[in-house]
Image (cartoon, rainbow, N blue to C red):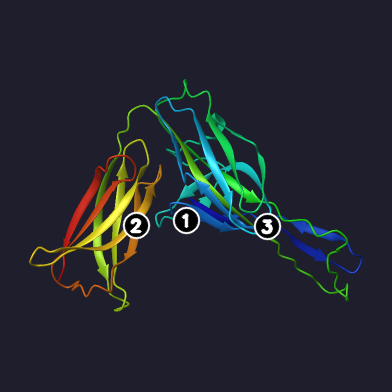
Amino acid sequence: MYATMLMKRLTLRVQQRYEIIFATAFTLSFLLLHTVIVHAQGNLMIYPKRVVFDGSKRTQDLGLANTGADTATYQVSFVQVRMKEDGSFENIEQPDSGQSFASANLRIFPRTVTIAPKESQAVKLQAINTGSLPPGEYRSHVYFRAVPAPLPAGETPMRPKDTSNLEVKLVPVFGVTIPVIIRVGADSTLVVISDMDLDFKDPKQPQVMFALNRSGNMSAYGDLTIDYISPSGQRTRAAAVKGVAVYTPLLKRKVRIDLDNTAKLNYHQGRLEVSYETASGKPATLAKQEMFLR
């Protein structure tokens, strides 16, 4: 899941009071949390944080809750994104080689939702016409874009006293997205952990670095745990991150995680073990790797 901020309008006022409005491209960033809270005219919570259609599953209700103090309105649409090696995202219009969009085979309704404070509403997501799709994975993202609240009755926008000066007005509009995936056929995905190393640039906050290498026809998704194993064999949890994805067609995702710096663990002796396990149902190991410390 990710939060987005669209700098909605740049308004240039000249002496003749003509207005030129430029729409800027929005920037996407993802929050990998159990639930997503975004400040956008109130707080929006969405569950589930991702949707996968496979097998006979054809519909999914998305629960939206407004935990803020103001009524909020959201427009619902689909966007397409690319995952980069560092785990960040950028919006795209055309799929990369090896990537397929799901939006042509998805339906969502309603397309506009208004939620009162402390209230909730369901949005229905449906997979359609998937019987003829070739085997593989199809992914798009549902985008909930906050609609700016109108000015109160009788209130007018502020105008500059000197209309010969340039005025730049930025109106931030917030939103949140969740991935929606359609899977067809058998999953041949494999993950290997490589390039493990430690970073002691900040002696007060050591970090472990490694790469998740994905192969096969579908994305990988799971939880990461890092255990410290002392020379005597005692195991201590040093870090954990939930909901880590490697989306197609990305083959290698670089990961950097802060290690526990409160347990007085000696990261210059013993071992570190990184485990990548499925995040739903009965846990299954996707990949595991150890590193001897020195």
Mark 1 surroundings: few (<14), some (14-19) or many (≥20) residues within 10 A? some
Q: Residue at x 85, y 58 (%)?
A: 153
Q: Is residue 184 positioned above or below 181 on the image?
A: above
- Which numbered tag is attached to residue 70? 3
Amino acid residing under circle 3: Asp
In the image, residue 215 lies at what x, y percent? 30, 41
What separation in Å lies between label 2 and label 1 (alpha carbons)?
Answer: 12 Å
Answer whether labels 3 and 1 touch (C-beta < 8 Å): no
Picture quadrant of residue 217? top left
Q: Identity of the amino acid at label 2?
A: Val
Residue bearing the label numbered 1: 31
Residue extending farthest right: 16
**How far, Cα to Cα, is label 3 from label 2?**
32 Å
N-term mark: 3 or 1: 1
Quarter holding the C terminus is bottom left
Mark closer to the chain start, 3 or 2:
3
Q: Which residue is mark 2?
A: 241
Dot 3: element = loop
Up-down relation of residue 233 to residue 64 (above or below):
below
Q: Could you give the CA–CA distance between mark 3 and mark 1, rounded to whole angstroms?
A: 23 Å
List the single residue furthest toward the front.
118
Question: Residue at 56% of width from left, 31% of height from top?
Answer: 104
